[in-house]
Amino acid sequence: MNDASPALENLLTETRAFPPSPEFAAQANVTADEYDEAVADRLGFWADRARGLLTWQTPFTTVLDDSRAPRYDWFTDGRLNAAYNAVDRHVEAGNGDRVAILWEGEDGSERRITYAELAAEVARAANAIAGLGIQTGDRVAIYLPMIPEAIVAMLACARIGAPHSVVFGGFSADALHSRILDAQARLVITADGGFRRGAASPLKPAVDDALAKGGTDVEHVLVVRRTGGDVAWTEGRDVWWDDVVPHAPAEHEPVWVEAEHPLFILYTSGTTGKPKGIFHTTGGYLTQCAYTHSAVFDLKPETDVYWCTADIGWVTGHSYVAYGPLVNGATQVVYEGTPDSPHKGRWWEIIQKYGVTIFYTAPTAIRTCMKWGEEIPGGFDLSSLRVLGSVGEPINPEAWMWYRRVIGGDRCPVVDTWWQTETGAIMISPLPGVTATKPGSAQVPLPGISARILDDAGEPVGDGQGGYLAITEPWPAMLRGIWGDERRYAETYWSRFPGRYFAGDGAKYDDDGDIWLLGRVDDVMNVSGHRLSTTEIESALVAHPWVAEAAVVGASDETTGQAVVAFVILRGGDEITDLPTGEDGGEAIVQTLRGHVGQVIGPIAKPRSILVVTELPKTRSGKIMRRLLRDVAENRAVGDVTTLADGGVMDLIQQGLAKG
Ligand code: WTA
């Protein structure tokens, strides 16, 4: 087990519980009966949800095909279209005037987009993309800020059955390049830039740099104008969105794809240096997105105003901004910027302005707002809120209580939702009208989901005990694989406990049998709810000419959950002539290396600190003992060193750091 867990032991002494109010329970979308219904007939339960929540062009007769396990296929003989389900059918049902997107730009600009307008825009964009040669099955990379066009672009791809690969705008040109290559994307959709922290931040240059590295299949770059800044232009390749989309016809026949047709690829960090292209398909994914969005947030599409703060570059932005809410016909807020621009009350101001009723964000954001002080949200009217959600990392009880009291006025249920890029949709969470919520626990698998905590040998553990979280039955929104690497899929997720999905998280049952997540048990870090791989950052560091060896650990951090701390050994020898020296030399080296990681992966991966050392602690077999480095990074007494090849190395490291 990962040794981050002892610090989390105290979570299990938490005994407070908050049952839903009788009024909330009485009006809730889901009652406790759904657990029983799903236990009695799990596949029947999901088949009913798939039929009830989605519109199928061809109904399915097969629910689950496990003949190719661990590749599981759902609703295989059905046909549908994701964009039609997200938009058109609401218009056909007479809800075209309902607002789909309440968009707020960081610079204060606003756009209100109804379902009818969204339907027309998606159809135009689909026609425009098809006009650029994109056909069903082609991959499209999307590298956009949080503007309505991001959602339009995703849906336009879905409409023609072209899987999208959204790359977070905070990733570098290098990271974008490797993702474009891996997916063999033929089109990139980007913008001149977006607004962040009051300034225009350019995006198009990273696309130009990525494509200049060569080897890609990209024929066109479709560019949305957002900031109005100057952009370099490649004639014949680059096309302005405004030159093609507004003129394209607003009618487009959706491509009815098989339920198992790939909907998207999304890259996430794993335990190796190479990000994994997690791919999801259409029917099962949409079923579970729609069901969980309705059940976990108790969504009432006619009256609720929903807001999830995630960027579409992450899976939360896929399932709970682009797909779940729209498939359910919700009205949602989409905000372009950061919570502190132009002032630290911006989020609460938005909640007050639009009367947001359901709010979904990450623990790191909650902890940041706690730090800023409760008088900031206290200055806004948050009485419209009725459900609060948390996602991305374990939420500590203190932050949970603050969220409930300060933001939720002690009246809103807080749902802590556990899931992953791989699971596609929420798996473990309280139900707001059913569960007595506990601060810091994700608690129970949702109806239709089977999860167990297993010991080392794969045996289920009992109440009060901990181990590894596993999903024991296939679920509709599950990943269908790692793009282009079936073997890695089977090895990563299905070999640790044969026949069961290994999530990579440690977890414990409390005495009531509720689940508490304890963080990753592998070399994946969670920084501000973003997954980063230690190995990936280590590879980036050793790619720099000054670095001989590097070890990266995730050290606990009060605000970001974990923070990246790197230990590096510099190269000696004559061939390195440009190494900064003198009084400021050390600082110059650190800044250069941080910048280098930012360039290779993206600003989110920049280490919080880089410590230059002369040795790294290794076992006799040469494996770096990250546990000991984490002790150093967290200013703790260094733990057991008996398995080190050279027992004195930790003393050396600490003496060196004390001197530096
Ligand atoms: C962590 C984000 C505790 C976990 C949706 C998981 C959580 C990883 C929670 C997936 C939660 C996510 N409580 N830990 N409620 N939600 N995690 O793929 O370690 O970006 O494996 O998906 O985040 O991160 P990913």
Image (cartoon, rainbow, N blue to C red):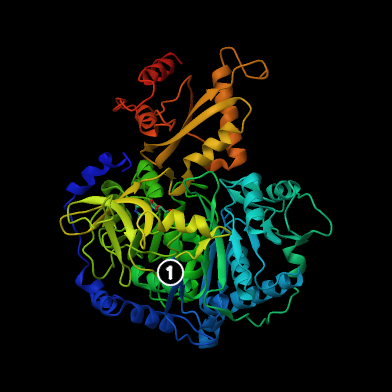
x, y percent for residue 604: 52, 43
Horizontal and vertical percent for residue 54?
47, 81
Q: Position of residue 286 (x, y in %)?
A: 47, 73
Q: Quadrant of the rendered structure where residue 160 is?
A: bottom right
Between 407 and 534, the one nearer to me in the picture = 534
- Decide if residue 159 is on the left or right side of residue 446: right
Question: Position of 234 compared to 223: left or right?
Answer: right
Residue 310 or 442: which is nearer the viewer? 442
Query: Is residue 381 in view?
Result: no
In the foreground, 438 or 411? 438
Q: Is residue 184 left or right of residue 542?
A: right
| Percent coordinates x, y for residue 298 in the rendering | 34, 71
- Identify which residue is drawn at 67% across, 54% down: 181
Residue identifier under label 1: 305
The amino acid on which the numbered mark 1 sits, given as a three-letter code, is Val
Location of the N terminus (image quadrant): top left
Confirm or reject: label 1 Cβ below 8 Å from ligand 1. Answer: no
Q: Quadrant of ligand 1?
A: bottom left
Label 1, residues with CA under 10 Å away: few <14, some 14-19, many ≥20: many
Residue 24, relative to residue 593: is it above or below? Answer: below
Position of 447 with respect to 529 (left or right) is: left
Q: Secondary structure at mark 1?
A: strand
